[in-house]
Amino acid sequence: MSVRVVQSETVQTSSGILRWLGLIPAVVIGTIVTWFIASILSGIGWAQVGFDPDGFLVKAFRVCFTHIAAGVAFVYFGTEAAPGHQTTVGLVLAGLGLLIAGFLAFPAFMVKDYWAIAGAVSVVMGIGGALQAVFVKYGRSQP
């Protein structure tokens, strides 16, 4: 009986270690895949309605929608891949995402690339929304 408990703890520990090691790849892959899916879906949606795909409204929506989805995915995939401490992981990923968005927005400000600035602001909005969802789902503190 005690052998089974030790084996299950060993399996649980090794799976926990593998989940911690796979956290960053899961975040990166999940964010990229989410961005592509959001881009494809928004393109299909606007094509169905009959809007010009190169128009200002369509481009503004696609930039904002895809980047908000990427920001949400960045925090969501990390908190779901982590074996524990989801609130802390969500906060760390949100901070990392804000740093990345800031570093990527700085050159956009320098060359006045307004679409990139809108994308960076949208990523920050997505990260904020996902962090709020993490707090609602897991609470503010965890053991």
Image (spheres, rainbow, N blue to C red):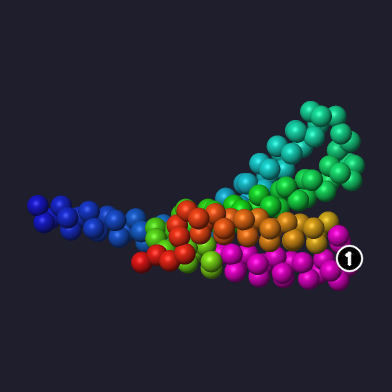
Whole-percent x, y for residue 89 in the image: 49, 64
- Which residue is denoted by mark 1 in the rendering? 112
The residue at 59%/64% (across/down) is 94
Question: In the displayed structure, would residue 100 be above or below residue 134?
Answer: below
Q: Nearer the viewer, residue 40 or 134?
A: 134
How would you classify the magenta stretch by its main secondary structure?
Answer: helix
- Farthest residue, direction left: 1
- The image quadrant that residue 47 belongs to is top right
Q: Quadrant of the C terminus?
A: bottom left
The residue at 58%/55% (across/down) is 130
Whole-percent x, y for residue 128 in the image: 63, 60
Q: How many marks?
A: 1
Q: Is residue 12 magenta?
A: no
The residue at 76%/57% (across/down) is 119
SS type, badge 1: loop
Q: Nearer the viewer, residue 69 or 140?
A: 140
* Magenta region, residue range: 93-114
**Residue 25, visible in the rendered structure:** no
**Residue 92, visible in the rendered structure:** yes
Residue type at mark 1 is: Lys
The residue at 74%/61% (across/down) is 120
Q: Is residue 12 left or right of residue 131?
A: left
Q: Nearer the viewer, residue 106 or 126?
A: 126
Q: Nearer the viewer, residue 4 or 83?
A: 83
Instruction: Report crowding for label 1: few under 14, some 14 to 19, many 20 or more residues within 10 A (C-alpha).
Output: few
Question: In the displayed structure, would residue 92 be above or below residue 118?
Answer: below
Whole-percent x, y for residue 31 in the image: 61, 52
Whole-percent x, y for residue 126 in the image: 65, 55
Q: Is residue 27 left or right of residue 69?
A: left
